[in-house]
Amino acid sequence: MTAADEFYEAALRIADRKLDREGPFGPVLRPRLGTGGNFSDLFLWDTVFCIFWAKYHPERYPLENSLDNFYRLADVDGFISRQYLPTGESKWSKEHPISFAPPILAWAELELAEAGLFPGRLERVYPALVRHHAFCRAHFRQPDGMFFSDPFGCGLDNLPRWPRSGPDPTGGIPLRKEHIHPAFQATTGKKLLPDPRFCWNRQADWIDTSAQMAFNARNLARIAERIGCPGREIDAYRQEHAAIAAAINRIAWSEADGFYFDTLADGTPIRRFFATSYWTLPAGVVPEERLDRYLAHLNDPAKFCRPVPVPTLAADDPDYDPENGYSAGPVWIFMDYMILRGLRSCGREALARSIASKLFEGTLRLFRSTGTIWENYSPEDSGRPAKGEPDFCGWSALAPIAVRREFLDC
């Protein structure tokens, strides 16, 4: 067995141990895919990115249960929480964007359909996907046609999304005790309520959230077409995609920097280079004439081209902390996978394979030295992360399974 094969098999063994097989009686379907960490909660972000590697082993992993839980637990208005307790209750109130669940379920559902799995599933889940998209549109859309989120909602908890002066709470939706499940108000609330991160939300247009909404509109159009919905319904989602794409290109693009930034309400760019910007690639919103300059940052050592790519925050940002930064610097495999898929979608296969090769080799080296798979990785290739859990399969199984199978010849 090669080292790459050992890496692959280890990911499957860890994922087997992480399966949630038992829990309290209630609406949650089990078994279901677990997170990589020692959590019993259901996380939408984790679950979706697990689908992309688990789809290669549908006989081994409960793909349908894992996704169906979010539709079963959704509110009638379309709200889906990013995090549910094992009882099926949301940990967060829908009244604050800390509960925001990125609209990426349709992407996972299309993956399963395109793999030939679960015939008839798209017809069954499409109404729930439509309701969730409508909820996000109604609650997170800005007057200029862009969208906003929250540090937890974006999937990178402490990425500094604000200007370097710090998160100004003015105009934001403050986190209050009543936004947290009563069982956690005394514990989680004590930590989060004083934290200025959780007042930073609608003060800015978030490039990743805006691109995700465009991507979701595009995916809903694809699903609607596959299942034979009326043409006007398909066209409505295509028009929504075009409208969000136009807003992104009008508001978020910096011609001076060749990059899409988060922007303040007055249009001022927050000139910090986040890997989250590259959600624009799978969303299909980047004009061809902008691609070369935009993608050049992925080849720039001062930005994202580190020994193990792609750091969440550019290497020349003052807050870049590759070892201790958690979301402010280290490599997160789900971000890399999104970027790889985006590069492929816009025809940049050579760059995708180059990034995939460096990522795979870096994660494989750490597997060989530590015997496990990690929550995040140092972009400087300096060993086990200072802030990252081991046995994280979980989304990190993307590296030995999906990245290898889809982008490499090893």
Image (spheres, rainbow, N blue to C red):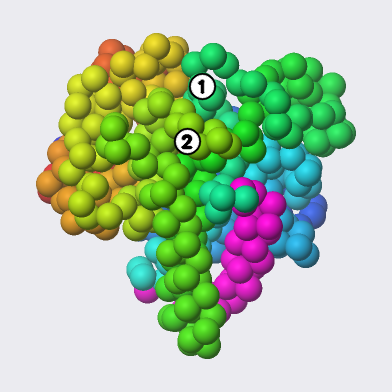
- SS type, badge 2: loop
| First in sequence: mark 2 vs mark 1 | 1
- Residue 60's quadrant in the figure? bottom left
> Height in image: 249 above or below 356?
below
With 311 as the anchor, is 209 left or right in this view?
right
Question: Is residue 410 at all visible to an observer of this figure?
Answer: yes
Q: Residues within 10 Å of mark 2 (few under 14, many from 20)?
A: many
Magenta: main secondary structure = helix
On the image, the x and y values in percent for residue 342 come to 30, 51
| Residue at 42% over, 57% down | 246
Circle 2 sits on which residue? 262
Q: Give the residue at x 71% y 31%.
A: 171
Question: What stretch of residues is rendered in magenta?
Answer: 116-142
Q: Position of residue 347 (x, y in %)?
A: 18, 56
The disc at residue 371 is none
Can the viewer see residue 355 in this picture? no
Nearest the camera: 403 or 233?
233
Q: Quadrant of the N terminus?
A: top left
Q: Is residue 141 magenta?
A: yes
The residue at 43%/64% (across/down) is 242
Percent of width and height locating residue 118: 47, 74
What residue type is disc 1 on? Answer: Pro
Residue at image coords 39%, 11% = 318
Q: Name the amino acid type tagged 2.
A: Asp
Placement of the C terminus among the 4 image quadrants: top left
Toward which corner of the image does residue 149 lie, by quadrant? top right
Q: Is residue 164 left or right of residue 203?
A: left
The residue lying toward the viewer, choosing from 280 and 336, is 280
Left or right: where 89 falls relative to 80: right
**Residue for badge 1:** 163
175 up-or-down from 142: above or below: above
Instruction: Say above or below: 120 vs 210.
Output: below
